[in-house]
Image (cartoon, rainbow, N blue to C red):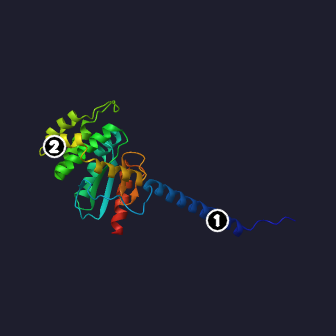
Amino acid sequence: MKSKGSPFKFVVIITLVVIALIVALVVINNQNSESKKGKTFDKQPSIEGQPTLGDPKAPVTVVEFGDFKCPSCKMWGENIFPQLVSDYVETGKVKFSFINVLFHGEESKLASLAAESVYKQNPDIYWEFHKALFNKQPSENHDISWVTIDKILELASGVSGIDTDKLKADIESNSEINGVNKDTEMVTEFGVQFTPTIMVNGTMIEDPFDYDSIKKAIENALEEN
């Protein structure tokens, strides 16, 4: 005669199934969280000698690997950067630094050389020139040639405090090429594959346009300090 199954045994099985589902959900959620956070390195990019905005003593460093020819970098600068500055840079919690990336070839290099020269002239006016370069980027036909010495000098003439004669001489002599090469070395060191790439201390954010992920990484870094 076939015996009936124990109700207690049935409850135990159901309980185990529910627990297994909960564990699976937790694992998936953690994986998604790690995916959004991106890769974490043992160290953060060095910002020594780099253009940096904010309190030098701010406990958290946010770095953008960006390219002046990159449309996504322009978009990030217009939509994400102002909020980051308002929430964290102006409040003294974050210092922000920009590292040049030359993914778009000679024009990227020319723009970076110009920006490095302006920074060397006067760090205080770098960010105005930085913004002017991105503003000049065409809204359409991004691949057209628009970064020229003449265009750079025209932009620079509209920024108070830039010695355009010195800027022209610096560009033509490649006087700041060491700074550009230093940035390229960091691009390789941290395996930067797209622009913009955003790093919070030693953590690379998977989606630079996910501001919540940036905020979470900053808040986690603040808790560690």
Q: Is residue 203 left or right of residue 5?
A: left
193, above or below 141, in the image: below
Q: Quadrant of residue 24?
A: bottom right
109, 91: nearer the viewer? 109
How many numbered marks, from 0 up? 2
Identified at 37% across, 45% down, the residue is: 195
Residue 164 x, y percent position in the rendering: 15, 40
**Viewer can see residue 158:** no
Q: Amino acid at mark 1?
A: Leu
From the image, state whether disc 2 or disc 1 is nearer to you. Answer: 2
Q: Residue furthest left?
A: 160
Q: Is residue 174 above or below residue 97?
A: above
Q: Quadrant of residue 25?
A: bottom right
The residue carrying pointer 2 sits among few (fewer than 14), some (14 to 19) or many (20 or more) residues within 10 Å by Cα, namely few
- Name the residue tied to disc 2: 166
Please tell me which residue is depicted at 70% across the width and 65% down the height of the picture: 10
Quick one: label 2 or label 1, which is nearer the N terminus?
Answer: 1
Name the residue that disc number 1 marks: 16
Task: Pick the quarter of the image with the N terminus.
Answer: bottom right
- Could you tell me how far apart the alpha carbons at marks 2 and 1 are, in whole angstroms? 74 Å
Answer yes or no: is residue 3 visible: yes
Identify the residue shown where x is 70% and y is 69%.
8
Q: Amino acid at mark 2?
A: Lys
Q: Position of residue 122 (x, y in %)?
A: 16, 51
Q: Is residue 33 left or right of residue 25?
A: left
Please identify the quadrant where the C terminus is shown.
bottom left
- In the rendering, at what x and y percent does residue 137 appear? 28, 36
Q: Using a 10 Å C-alpha cutoff, classify the residue at mark 1 as few (fewer than 14 neighbours), some (14 to 19) or many (20 or more).
A: few
Camera-nearest residue between 9 and 121? 121
Dot 1 lies on which element? helix
Mark 2 secondary-structure assignment: helix
